[in-house]
Amino acid sequence: MNPIRSLIRELAEKHGRRRESLLPIMLAVVEREKYLSEYSMVEIAREVDIPAAEVYGTATFYSFIETKPTGKYIIRICKTITCSMKGKNLVLFAIQDMLKIKLGETTPDKRFTLMETNCLGWCHKAPAMMVNNDVYTELTPEKVRDILSGYMKINELN
Amino acid sequence: MAIANQLKRVDFIFNNENDWEKVLSSSIKKKPQDLINELISSELKGRGGAGFPTGIKWKLAAEAKNDSKYIICNADEGEPGTFKDREILSKVPYKVLTAMAICGYITGAKEGFIYLRGEYKFLQTELQKAIDEFQYYCKEIKFDFSITIFMGSGAYICGEETALMESMEGKRGEPRNKPPFPTQNGYLDKPTVINNVETLVHTFTIFKYGAKKFYDLGVQYSRGTKLFSVSGDTPKPGIYELELGMSLQDFVYEFGDGDTKAVQVGGASGFLVPRKKFKDAAIGFKGKLTGISLPTGGSMMLFNSSRSMYNVLDNYLEFFREESCGQCTPCRVGCQQLLLGIKAVKRGEKPASYLEKLLRLTETMQLTAKCGLGQSVANSFSSIVENFQEEMIY
């Protein structure tokens, strides 16, 4: 059995084959694969025994469930009002300049995907961004370059 | 210049939580009815923004007849400018867990959930540790109540209580029609109490100190304290616990940078108050407060005179357009058209009078949208457009 199929089976057993388990199962697959492929959606539908269209409909509702392949590190920069007022664009330009990608794109080495997101809940320490589940606040162009260099170094070691 | 009244700082929420075991064990020795009466007499209202009396909510769920009931802690804090719940869950998680368990005891629910927004996933490990220790204690005192974390995944609308339940049921987070209300037909169609994180912590305070200590703070119809998330153009952004009923003038005196042009109270779905109305506005629920009373989930964003109110509104509308669940037409199409409309007026493609049309559209949305999201777009839209019309046009 291929690894994704067995992961989904494992998850279905752990969370139970019920509709309420759908989100936890999908999130666990995204955690592992960084996105939810159509193949995974069909497999989840089979395991939980609901129509694949329902899985697709649910998956595409949630902005943290990507349905297209993404990089190993997903950068989500907050664009809501306070972050936008406190210099989010300068930070965004610095990231784009450093990674040579635009919003919504993934670096050719499949390491970084760059996105904007709505309020992250760090308005008192704006601007803020997430890299996967880690939060970085009070960003400046210099600071964000340091942070991303850190991630690039991890990559070189691996 | 008039001398502003000092704002009353309070420290209930973040004070010592080490006595949670005592609060739990002593509360579950009391009669559920007595606890409910205590809560009702405190006049605590929901702190997520809507302001429903908490005691009444718990009473309704307690009276509902069903074998299974649920308690949900709403930690899907997504309103722009709000970040207090994250602080509560990282600093005093045991207060939240204890309050959920006491609510379970009162209503007869055996299962509780914390719906944690995806953006706060970094809190999950620590919170789970607290839950594990909490469950261990429950077992020791032979009290049957389980708590599970349910992770959200980046959808503002899931903070709406029925959308949150749909989401927990594995569906798209689309709000349901109300009635029926969650206290009758909630999660999995069972009676459910759903409360904001902060509301639960206030119930802890009330069970620990008694209703009077809470009731004595605040003003009529707006009792107790509230956490405020202060951000924007302020020298001291952060989280502050303040007595309800303060005037916005005093608030700006304390938190403004001397050049405050307007304050957004209640996040993007709340109201923008311009400088000339600061002295007439008070922070609290509707009632006999003089002048305008502004309910809030605690988001206070300050803007100074360097900010363009057009940009602020543009940012909010883009937010709503993206976060509208798309289920009902007034909200889905309304948010899109409002954004297109103000852009067209700004570029001069539409006359200034077009703003009137857009205001009428927000009135329609207020009347016909299915849930609070679509209904409340009118709040920020009309308060910005009416007070800063020139900035919308030129």
Image (cartoon, helix red, strand yellow):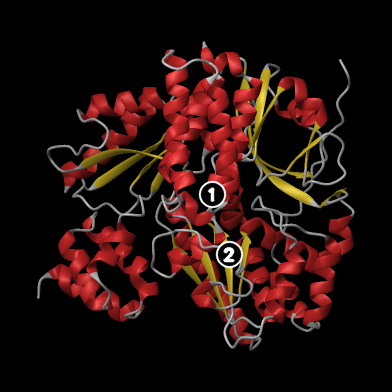
Disc ID at residue A143: none
Q: Residue at x 67, y 81 (%)?
A: B64
> Which chain does tag 2 point to?
B
Amino acid type for the residue under numbered disc 2? Cys
Q: Secondary structure at mark 1?
A: loop
Q: Is residue B262 left or right of residue A73?
A: right
- Residue B207 in which image quadrant: bottom right
Nearer to us: label 1 or label 2: 1
> Quick check: B223 above or below B362?
below
Q: Return the x and y of residue B378 as percentages of the image width and height.
A: 59, 37
* Residue closest to the eye, B279 or B320: B320
- Residue A45 in which image quadrant: bottom left
Q: Return the x and y of residue B390 as percentages of the image width and height.
A: 59, 13
Residue for badge 1: B369
Classed neighbour count for the residue bearing mark 1: other residues with Cα under 10 Å, few (<14), some (14–19), many (≥20): many
Disc ID at residue B73: 2
> Quick check: B98 above or below A118?
below
* Residue closest to the eye, B373 or A99: B373
Q: Return the x and y of residue B104 as percentages of the image width and height.
A: 65, 78
Q: Residue at x 59, y 44 (%)?
A: B366
Q: Secondary structure at mark 2?
A: strand
* Residue closest to the eye, B29 or B105: B105
> Which chain does tag 1 point to?
B
Separation of residues labelled 1 and 2 (CA atoms): 25 Å
Quick check: can you spot residue A136?
no
Q: Residue furthest left?
A: A1
On-image quarter of the N terminus of chain B: top right
Q: Using the rendered image, report if marks 1 and 2 lie on a common chain.
A: yes
